[in-house]
Amino acid sequence: MNKDDQDRIQQLLREALPPMQKAEPRGNLWPEVLQRLNVQPRIAIKSIPLLDWALAGGLLAFFAFAPMTIPVLLYYL
Amino acid sequence: MRDGASSVLDEFRQGNVDAFEKLFRLHQRAVYWWILRIVRNPDEAEEVTVEAFWRIHRAHARFDPRRSFEAWARTIATHAALDSLRAHRKERNISLEPIQDPPAPSAPDPAFVAEIRQRTALAFERLPPRLRVAALLAVVEQLPHKEVAEALGISVTAVKLRVFRALRLLRTDLQRQGITP
């Protein structure tokens, strides 16, 4: 693609998508940000695997110390 | 002697929410405006602005007070906007059939021109988001490559490469539809 091709595509793109007009948020976004900080859903989601690992580790340790509980657990599953 | 702005940045770095609120009120318009230029939708831009400031707060300990807060926030906002573009990427069922009977170049038909623009916009939406962002900022918004590079966290050469690839893919898509730019 030569320079002329690039210039023509750029021109076409600018005609199809004109630059955005400067704008501001329609409302105060701080309450939403604050709510997000308090809720922190993504941190909770991201921490789930760590908790799972901790639980799995705890179970494995438990079974290592008391292997006789494994058949009992399997019986009830 | 330390000035007020430096003190706010230090407090923000330590996780102080009041300092974060001050920075939010100072920079929210600029961050929103930057995001709007990328996502090109006011509702989505507001959502992404909230997401960006949440990420900014989450990363407070990594902020270097010697750096510009605005530039740092812009980089985070750019990545939040990029993630939003990826999440909202839609597979549109549009016709890729060639345009029939294009008019003579000397007498452009307004409906034909409008269709070309619409197809160009839709073809642009089909580009990979990281190429689209580079082209939006560098070509549509005509921002300096250096500014785009800083916002994307890549080199100026990488920006030029992404823009070139975006334009080349766009041309290929349009040619497949019978549009020769």
Image (cartoon, coloured by chain):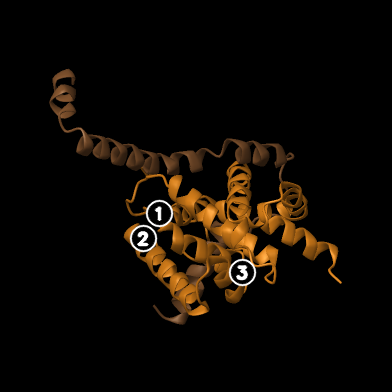
Most extreme residue toward the top is A76
Q: Is residue B86 left or right of residue B36?
A: left
Q: Quadrant of residue A61?
A: top left
Residue located beneath label 1 in the image: B126
Q: Quadrant of residue A17?
A: bottom right
Q: Is residue B3 left or right of residue B20?
A: right
Q: Nearer the viewer, residue B165 or B34?
A: B34
Residue located beneath label 3 in the image: B142
Question: Pointers 2 and 1 in contact (CB under 8 A)?
Answer: yes
Q: Is residue A61 left or right of residue B5?
A: left
Q: In front of the other: label 2 or label 1?
A: 1
User: Which element carries disc 2, helix, strand or loop?
Assistant: helix
The hue in which chain A appears in the rendered picture of the protein? brown
Q: Nearer the viewer, residue B116 or B90?
A: B90
Name the amino acid, label 1. Arg
Query: Residue at point 18% right, 18% down?
Result: A76
Query: Residue at point 70% right, 56% down?
Result: B12
User: Which element carries disc 1, helix, strand or loop?
Assistant: loop
The CA span between labels 1 and 3 is 21 Å
Reply above or below: A68 against A54. above
The CA span between labels 3 and 2 is 23 Å
Reply above or below: B144 against B47. below
Labelled disc at residue B173: 2
Q: Nearer the viewer, residue B141 or B99?
A: B141
Name the amino acid, label 2. Asp
Within 10 Å of disc 1 (Cα), the crowding (few <14, some 14-19, many 20+) is some
Chain under label 2?
B
Within 10 Å of disc 3 (Cα), the crowding (few <14, some 14-19, many 20+) is few
* x and y percentages locating residue B88 in the rendered image: 46, 45
Query: Residue at point 20% right, 39% down?
Result: A64
* x and y percentages locating residue A3 in the rendered image: 46, 81
Instruction: Give the quadrant of the C terminus of chain B.
Output: bottom left
